[in-house]
Image (cartoon, helix red, strand yellow):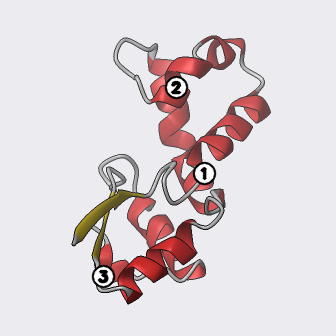
Amino acid sequence: MNIGIDLDDVVYDTSAEVEKEIEKANNPLLVEYKVQIMRGAMKGVPEEIANFLTDTIITYTENAKPIKNAISTLRKLKEDGHIITIITARSDMMRDGVVDSTLKSMKKYGIDKGLLY
């Protein structure tokens, strides 16, 4: 079976890292838009919010920890003969270095980069 899996909030707990960055910024506007940010609903948010996410994407993608059992589940599925494709919207179009930080994190946790699309 072919299985497509997203990185953010499926393999990695990215939302927890974004939330930490929001708290560190100590910006009332970020707090006001926190729910919208956490849902990824960026349409209509002030430019300051979009800039914050662009400015911090390297930090939160590198620091996000795998969700419990996500990596072992991926390995088990692969061992069982399934084809795993990791799908992500992360790209260097968001900010230079995003792809490298994603690959660095995948290597750190032993995720096969050949599965990334």
Q: Label 1: which residue?
A: 13
Q: Label 2: which residue?
A: 37
Q: Label 3: which residue?
A: 114
Q: CA distance from mark 3 to mark 1?
A: 21 Å
Is 63 left, or right, of 10 in this rendering? right
Image quarter of the C terminus: bottom left
Given the image, on which type of amino acid does mark 3 rest? Answer: Gly
Is 27 left, or right, of 67 in this rendering? right
Report which quarter residue 88 is drawn in. bottom left
Residue at image coords 61%, 21%: 34
For the residue pair 76 and 95, the one nearer the viewer reads as 76
Residue at image coords 55%, 66%: 70
Q: Mark 1 or mark 3, which is nearer the start of the sequence?
A: 1
Is 65 left, or right, of 80 in this rendering? right
- Camera-near label (2 vs 1) is 1
Q: Look at the picture and state if 41 lies above or below 63.
A: above
Q: CA distance from mark 2 to mark 3?
A: 30 Å
> Dot 2: few (<14), some (14–19), or many (≥20) neighbours within 10 Å?
many
Q: Mark 3 or mark 2, which is nearer the start of the sequence?
A: 2
Residue at image coords 56%, 76%: 72
Element marked by disc 2: helix
Q: Mark 1 or mark 2, which is nearer the start of the sequence?
A: 1
Q: CA distance from mark 2 to mark 1?
A: 15 Å
Element marked by disc 1: loop
Given the image, on which type of amino acid does mark 2 rest? Answer: Ile
